[in-house]
């Protein structure tokens, strides 16, 4: 990682520097929860860090894909740091501030222009499911468990978070998840679309990084444009406007488009990384 990017990542992590690890290798950025002693619970500082970190990774030329994961072997995350319910969230005002910071961190993951993958070993509860659902793709182990449990705490799940859950699993299953507060097993999560793939517990990271490497080999201009188009459709847009036309033109005038067409005509695999370097 270049020194300037290393410094920027360190600044973005802030007070969460000992709770989140970031490694960038061959275009894949790994964001790892590093609180195994607390089952990788997500602290206030970690949510703040996500809000700063994800836009940084989204703009970094060295990053093609982001993988979010727990410490090796899991769990992915037990959710909120319970200790903070006695401190930062002990009064309504503090709870509202905490919720605002949490929403900013979640939205930073959702709106990251680079593809994001959640590699879920073990359970992902509460904020763990929230982070996973914020990612574009989700791969879990056979013994993984999921749940969003505000009904067990007297909390109303935030509107933006509820909207994302409905987008991922649909309104019927969002109702089940939020109204019962019960945990879902991996097969149910796969069936309802909460995860895209279920693999053996010991294969989660290998599979997630294989998918990340595959995505990193694709044309980045297509990936960014594809995410932007999906977001517009989800928001209800179906008509082409000036912003959409600009996305089209960006792809058609890119070095990656030229490489894609040339490699197709020459009947060889495209090298989009080389094309991007030549186009810079």
Image (cartoon, rainbow, N blue to C red):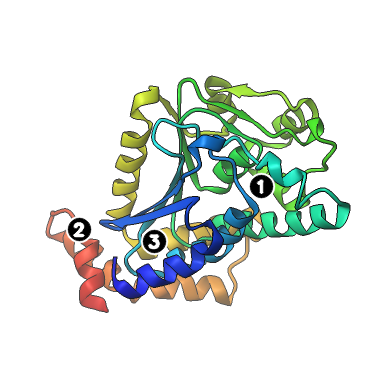
Q: Secondary structure at mark 1?
A: helix
Image point 62% across, 65% down: which residue?
239
Q: Quadrant of the N terminus?
A: bottom left
Decide: is 179 above or below 165. above
Quickly name the residue at label 2: 270
Quickly name the residue at label 3: 222
Q: Nearer the viewer, residue 48 or 255?
A: 48
- Of the two numbered discs 1 and 2 on the same chain, state the one appearing first in sequence: 1
Residue 164 badge: 1
Image point 63% across, 39% down: which residue?
79
Tag 3 and tag 2, C-beta contact below 8 Å:
no
- Of the two numbered discs 3 and 2 on the same chain, state the one appearing first in sequence: 3
Image point 34% across, 50% down: which residue?
215
Q: Quadrant of the C terminus?
A: bottom left
Please indicate whether residue 158 sits to the left or right of residue 196 in the image: right
Q: Is residue 254 visible?
A: no
Decide: is 53 above or below 188. below
């Amino acid at each position: 990682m270049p020194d300037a990017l290393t410094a920027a990542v360190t600044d973005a992590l802030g007070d969460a520097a000992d709770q989140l690890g970031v490694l960038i290798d061959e275009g894949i950025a790994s964001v790892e929860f590093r609180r195994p002693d607390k089952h990788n619970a997500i602290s206030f500082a970690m949510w703040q860090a996500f809000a700063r970190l994800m836009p940084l990774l989204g703009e970094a030329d060295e990053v093609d894909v982001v993988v979010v994961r727990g410490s090796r072997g899991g769990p992915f995350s037990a959710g909120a740091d319970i200790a903070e319910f006695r401190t930062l969230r002990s009064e309504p005002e503090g709870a509202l501030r905490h919720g605002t910071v949490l929403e900013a961190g979640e939205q930073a993951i959702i709106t990251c222009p680079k593809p994001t993958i959640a590699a879920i070993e073990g359970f992902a509860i509460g904020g763990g499911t929230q982070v996973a659902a914020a990612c574009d793709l989700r791969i879990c182990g056979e013994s993984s468990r999921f749940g969003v449990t505000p009904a067990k705490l007297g909390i109303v799940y935030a509107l933006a978070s509820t909207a994302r859950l409905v987008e991922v699993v649909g309104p019927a299953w969002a109702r089940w998840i939020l109204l019962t507060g019960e945990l879902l097993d991996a097969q149910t999560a796969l069936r309802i679309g909460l995860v895209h793939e279920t693999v053996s517990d010991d294969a989660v990271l290998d599979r997630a990084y294989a998918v990340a490497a595959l995505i990193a080999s694709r044309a980045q201009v297509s990936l960014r444009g594809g995410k932007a188009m999906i977001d517009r459709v989800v928001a209800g847009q179906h008509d082409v406007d000036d912003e959409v036309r600009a996305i089209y033109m960006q792809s058609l005038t890119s070095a990656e488009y030229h490489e894609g067409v040339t490699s197709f005509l020459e009947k060889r695999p495209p090298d989009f990384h080389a094309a991007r370097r030549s186009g810079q």
